[in-house]
């Protein structure tokens, strides 16, 4: 296992650039039932708060564990704040980033009228992350006598029900592989979309490698990371003739501190840029406005377009007044896209939430994407 060298928060703090006039920062993790995963996120937030002490930093989670987003916002309000920056600590922009987190912020505004959020973006295909993985791959090479031209890189992503997010995973993997010297690249996901881990390993073996390097593109440890390492352990038993090296998750690396600061500054400045051309929600609304229905042939219900927007109905309609919420999706293009995304940002962002992020939601339900055909049938549908 690679021994990742991580700078202390104290040493990182010495090089932290100051950013005046910042709002308190709400850092939103995905959430996990795994105690190690939850603890790692809380340690990350604590370390980041020590790295930059210029404003309060409060942790919370979207689902599966506490404190919830509502509890995080309540804590900010209790401290006397009515304006804050909210950052999703997520790698790619899928449903959680575009849909579920914003719904929770809207719920908070409904409970605390007058609240204003500057909403930041995910980490995405960031150059800092590319360099982090390149550095770790270089360090891993020093622990092996097998050259890259006899090795396969197996990139493992989380997987999402959003084709745009999955496409970014492929892009990042390809950027890492281009010019790397690895004999081959295979990509798979831990769940939701395909190919899954079994298929990823099967594809890796077809290269007849002498070494397989597993790169799990995950922020923190948790049940999924442990499962990925379990596959690597089994591969070592099945193929003792092949060297299997597994990188750890990103973890508490100063690179994440720097990325959080960048995303925070973007949000405050109203410079949050996202790719909306391939947003499944925007596509669904655009097709309905043209009378085409969703990409799978199923039309969105008429009331879902009542506000001229994609109406992610989470079970409660709450006016997503972007004059107040600020949500700061200036997106570089004001989220109007020239096509208004079906919502004009004065709109009713009627996020609702079929699976109740009152946090009763369970990931233990039957897998609706168990087969590749199951995923293909649902990939472009919106909630």
Image (cartoon, rainbow, N blue to C red):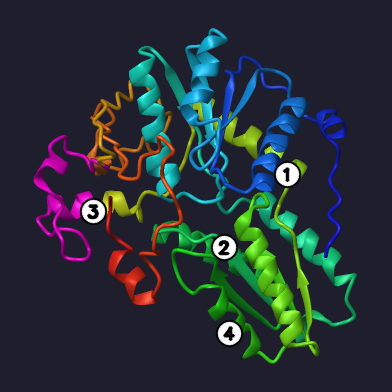
Image quadrant in which you'd find residue 40: top right
> At which x and y percent is residue 242?
78, 86
Depicted 382 relative to depicted 195: above or below: above
Direction from residue 48 to residue 308 in the image, left or right: left
Residue at which label 4 appears = 203
> At which x and y percent is residue 238?
72, 86
User: Is residue 179 something one can see in this rendering?
Assistant: no
Real-space Cα separation, disc 4 to disc 3, in angstroms: 34 Å
Residue at which label 3 appears = 284
Direction from residue 66 to residue 347 in the image, left or right: left
Q: Residues within 10 Å of mark 1 (few under 14, many from 20)?
A: some
In primary-sequence order, the first of circles 1 and 3 is 1
In the depicted view, which residue is nearer to us: 298 or 132?
A: 298
Image quadrant in which you'd find residue 303: top left
Direction from residue 36 to residue 59 in the image, left or right: left
Tell me the quadrant of the picture where the N terminus can be found: bottom right
Q: Residues within 10 Å of mark 3 (few under 14, many from 20)?
A: many
In primary-sequence order, the first of circles 4 and 1 is 4
């Amino acid at each position: 296992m690679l021994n990742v060298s991580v700078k202390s928060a104290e040493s990182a703090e010495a090089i932290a650039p100051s950013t005046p006039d910042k709002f308190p920062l709400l850092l939103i993790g995905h959430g996990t039932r795994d105690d190690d995963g939850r603890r790692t996120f809380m340690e990350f937030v604590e370390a980041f708060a020590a790295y930059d002490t210029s404003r309060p930093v409060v942790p919370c989670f979207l689902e599966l564990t506490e404190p919830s987003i509502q509890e995080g916002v309540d804590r900010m309000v209790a401290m006397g704040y009515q304006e804050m920056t909210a950052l999703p600590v997520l790698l790619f922009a899928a449903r959680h980033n575009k849909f579920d987190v914003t719904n929770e912020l809207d719920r908070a505004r409904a409970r605390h009228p007058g609240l204003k959020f500057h909403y930041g973006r995910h980490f995405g295909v960031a150059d800092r992350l590319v360099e982090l993985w390149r550095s770790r791959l270089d360090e891993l090479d020093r622990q092996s006598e097998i050259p890259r031209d006899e090795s396969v890189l197996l990139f493992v992503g989380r997987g999402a029900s959003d084709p745009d997010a999955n496409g970014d995973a492929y892009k990042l993997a390809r950027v890492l592989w281009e010019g790397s010297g690895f004999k081959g690249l295979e990509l798979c996901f831990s769940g939701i979309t395909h190919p899954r881990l079994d298929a990823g390993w099967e594809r890796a073996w077809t290269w007849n490698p002498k070494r397989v390097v597993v790169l799990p593109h995950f922020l923190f440890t948790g049940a999924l990371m442990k499962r990925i390492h379990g596959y690597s352990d089994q591969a070592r038993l099945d193929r003792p003739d092949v060297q299997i090296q597994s990188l750890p998750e990103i973890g508490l690396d100063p690179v994440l501190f720097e990325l959080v600061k960048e995303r925070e500054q973007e949000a405050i400045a109203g410079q949050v840029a996202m790719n909306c051309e391939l947003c499944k929600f925007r596509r669904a609304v655009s097709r309905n406005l043209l009378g085409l229905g969703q990409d799978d042939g199923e039309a969105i219900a008429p009331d879902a377009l009542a506000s001229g927007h994609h109406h992610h109905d989470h079970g409660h309609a709450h006016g997503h007044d972007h004059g107040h919420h600020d949500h700061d999706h200036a997106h570089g293009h004001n989220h109007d896209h020239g096509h208004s995304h079906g919502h004009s940002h004065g709109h009713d962002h009627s996020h609702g939430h079929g699976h109740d992020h009152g946090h009763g939601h369970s990931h233990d339900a039957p897998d609706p994407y168990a087969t590749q055909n199951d995923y293909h049938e649902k990939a472009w549908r919106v909630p």
